[in-house]
Image: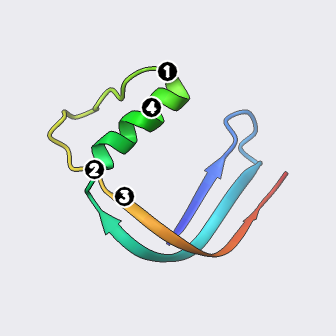
Amino acid sequence: MAVAISSPDDPTHYVQVRGRVVDVTTKGAAEHIEQLSLKYTGKPYPWYGGRDQERVIFVIEPASVSGTR
């Protein structure tokens, strides 16, 4: 699996993590998105599409990390 995150200020700046998925769970995933939303927006998660969505957490064992500065 690969995950790439770019800077909102400059999309040419990014970090990328590549690795394999070592765990997949739905346990605690709804609470996790709520915590992330509060941390980064200061507001509860808006639940686009409704609260009946199933949230999933993928745990990645990194094999490589790269990016720009």
Is 61 placed above or below 25 here? Answer: below
Place of residue 19 in the rendered image (x, y in percent of width and height, measured from the top left): 56, 76
Please name the residue that numbered disc 2 is placed on: 55
Report, in whole angstroms, how far the alpha carbon at label 4 lies from the one at label 2.
14 Å
Residue at 29% in and 63% down: 25
Please name the residue that numbered disc 4 is placed on: 37
Place of residue 49 in the rendered image (x, y in percent of width and height, measured from the top left): 22, 34
Instruction: Tell whether 22 sits left or right of 63.
Output: left
Report, in whole angstroms, how far the alpha carbon at label 4 lies from the one at label 1.
7 Å
Q: How is the image coloured?
A: rainbow
Q: Nearer the viewer, residue 11 or 23?
A: 23
Residue at 49% in and 21% down: 42
Residue furthest out toward the right: 69
Which amino acid, by three-letter code, is at mark 1? Gly
Report, in whole angstroms, how far the alpha carbon at label 3 lies from the one at label 4.
15 Å
Q: Quadrant of residue 21?
A: bottom left
What SS does tag 1 mark?
Answer: loop
State yes or no: discs 4 and 2 in contact (Cβ < 8 Å). no
Q: Residues within 10 Å of mark 4 (few under 14, many from 20)?
A: some
Please name the residue that numbered disc 1 is placed on: 42
Image disc number at residue 11: none
Q: Quadrant of residue 10?
A: top right
What SS does tag 4 mark?
Answer: helix
Which amino acid, by three-letter code, is at mark 4? Ser
Report, in whole angstroms, how far the alpha carbon at label 1 lies from the one at label 2.
20 Å
State yes or no: discs 2 and 3 in contact (Cβ < 8 Å). yes
Place of residue 50 in the rendered image (x, y in percent of width and height, measured from the top left): 19, 33
Which amino acid, by three-letter code, is at mark 2? Arg
Which amino acid, by three-letter code, is at mark 3? Ile
Image disc number at residue 57: 3
Instruction: Tell whether 46 sits left or right of 10.
Output: left
